[in-house]
Amino acid sequence: DVKVTQSSRYLVKRTGEKVFLECVQDMDHENMFWYRQDPGLGLRLIYFSYDVKMKEKGDIPEGYSVSREKKERFSLILESASTNQTSMYLCASSSLRGTTDTQYFGPGTRLTVL
Amino acid sequence: AQTVTQSQPEMSVQEAETVTLSCTYDTSESDYYLFWYKQPPSRQMILVIRQEAYKQQNATENRFSVNFQKAAKSFSLKISDSQLGDAAMYFCAYRSTMYSGGGADGLTFGKGTHLIIQP
């Protein structure tokens, strides 16, 4: 089974702090994604990556950056956390191989910025 | 840009009954993928069913089936013989086949439908 893990289930940070959210997948997937989930808004794409050191902006990249130094790991960085970044963050991965491109999701990190 | 609309914020159904969740989308593309994802309370999001737009046959997965109407841009999910374990948020999602970067592209999600199963 595909496994996508995220470093923390719950995280509390203060305004202005630098925050790292880590995501690791164990299926050698090329593609990795970061979404944020807010009630009544569904999931929105922040950034994605299709290869090591490659990244593309999603729909709401402002205030975020990402890093992909290794194929299995994709980090989301909040350079200076703000209260409006309080949200659930979901990581996902998918493969280019075969006929399926299903995205597999991690359990999520619920971030609270005080 | 594509949009996905789920017009039912919440649905309730009796156990063992059938329920249909609606989803419409807007796109100018002719080929794309559509998905239904399930997110149980405090649990991981998982794929329920997937449909390729070029396939006319509706996808089915056990008790889950879709009614894909390409011309109407409609993609509803039917759950037969509802079970308590079906209670969850259900998200409809769209993905283009035209990659914007290097072979990957994110999903565009609807806002979700909260499905309640009454015992």
Image (spheres, rainbow, N blue to C red):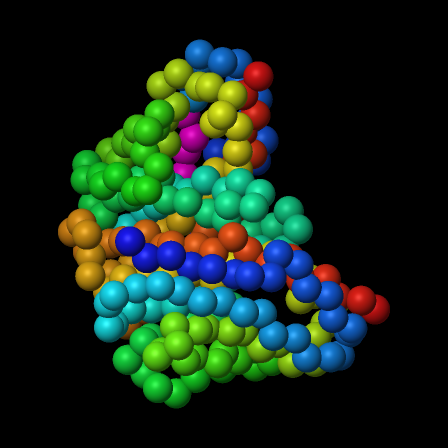
Query: Which range is magenta?
Result: A20-25
Instruction: Determine the main secondary structure of the stretch shown in magenta.
Output: strand
Q: Is residue A113 above or below residue B90?
A: above
Q: Residue at x 22, y 39 (%)?
A: A55
Residue B98, picture quadrant: bottom left
Q: How many marks?
A: 0
Image location (x, y in percent) of residue A19: 43, 21
Residue A21 shows up from this direction: yes
Image location (x, y in percent) of residue A56: 23, 41
Asked if the magenta segment contains residue A21, the reply would be yes
Q: Is residue A39 left or right of residue B70?
A: right
Q: Is residue B112 above or below residue A81?
A: below
Residue A27, picture quadrant: bottom left
Image location (x, y in percent) of residue B21: 58, 70
Q: Residue at x 45, y 73 (%)?
A: B75
Q: Residue at x 16, y 51 (%)?
A: B102
Asked if the magenta segment contains residue B15, the reply would be no
Q: Residue at x 25, y 44 (%)?
A: A49
Q: Which quadrant would the C terminus of chain B be assigned to in this image? A: bottom right
Image location (x, y in percent) of residue B26: 35, 63
Q: Is residue A25 above or below residue A62?
A: below
Q: Is residue B20 above or below residue A95?
A: below
